[in-house]
């Protein structure tokens, strides 16, 4: 074999080695970027979930406060003979300003049994306007139900 043929064989090997090494490094880089993208997406989802849950919690607490104050004022509490009624329901609690978290809360009173039964359902959303409405695809809903 002449020196030219040996040199050509070595050049082919170097190109093959460089292409293989580049493919391996590209695969590693794509794998790491995919993991980073999924983690970023997950962290955003967790934030949205927390916002919705805390909005539902604030709505339930506000409803409990209003219900307690309503019950402590004679003459303003609904008549027990009324059966099951809803009190100004649903109402909206805005947790943060302009497109932020909100909650839609319903209060239901059941007088039909031996005891008064109050059910508060608070649906919290991470995104909503002053009426707690939104058409965003990133909207997350969480619900808290309180029964007294």
Image (cartoon, helix red, strand yellow):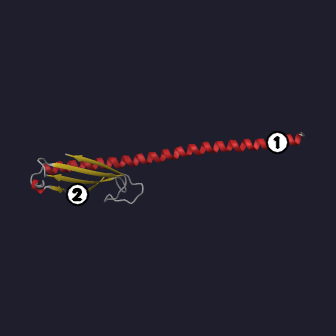
Quadrant where the C terminus is found in the figure? top left
Instruction: Write down the quadrant of residue 6 in the picture.
Output: top right
Label 1 Cα crowd, 10 Å radius (few <14 / some 14-19 / many 20+): few
**Which residue is rendered at x = 24% and y = 46% of the image?**
146
Using the image, tell me which numbered label, if any, was put on residue 9.
1
- Tag of residue 89: 2
Identify the image quadrant of residue 25.
top right
- Classify the position of the N terminus by image quarter: top right
Q: Secondary structure at mark 2?
A: loop
Residue 81 locus on image (x, y percent):
9, 55
Give the tally of numbered discs. 2
Judged from the image, the secondary structure of the residue bearing numbered disc 1 is: helix
What separation in Å lies between label 2 and label 1 (alpha carbons)? 83 Å
Left or right position of 32 against 84: right
**Residue at point 56% right, 45% down?**
33
**Residue at 31% over, 60% down:** 131
Tag 2 and tag 1, C-beta contact below 8 Å:
no
Q: Where is residue 43? Give x, y as percent.
A: 45, 45
Q: Position of residue 42 (x, y in %)?
A: 45, 46
Residue that sits furthest to the right in the current view: 2
Report crowding for label 2: few under 14, some 14 to 19, many 20 or more residues within 10 A (C-alpha): few
Q: Is residue 100 left or right of residue 61?
A: right
């Amino acid at each position: 074999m002449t020196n030219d043929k040996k040199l050509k064989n070595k050049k082919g090997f170097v190109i093959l080695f460089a292409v293989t090494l580049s493919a391996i490094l590209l695969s590693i880089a794509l794998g790491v970027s995919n993991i980073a993208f999924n983690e970023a997406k997950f962290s955003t989802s967790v934030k949205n979930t927390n916002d919705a849950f805390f909005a539902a919690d604030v709505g339930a607490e506000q409803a409990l406060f209003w219900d307690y104050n309503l019950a402590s004022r004679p003459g303003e509490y609904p008549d027990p003979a009324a059966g099951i009624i809803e009190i100004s329901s649903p109402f909206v609690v805005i947790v943060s300003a302009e497109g932020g978290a909100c909650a839609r809360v319903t209060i239901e009173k059941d007088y039909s049994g031996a005891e008064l039964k109050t059910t508060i359902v608070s649906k919290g959303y991470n995104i909503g306007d002053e009426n707690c409405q939104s058409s965003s695809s990133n909207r997350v809903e969480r619900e808290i139900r309180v029964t007294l």
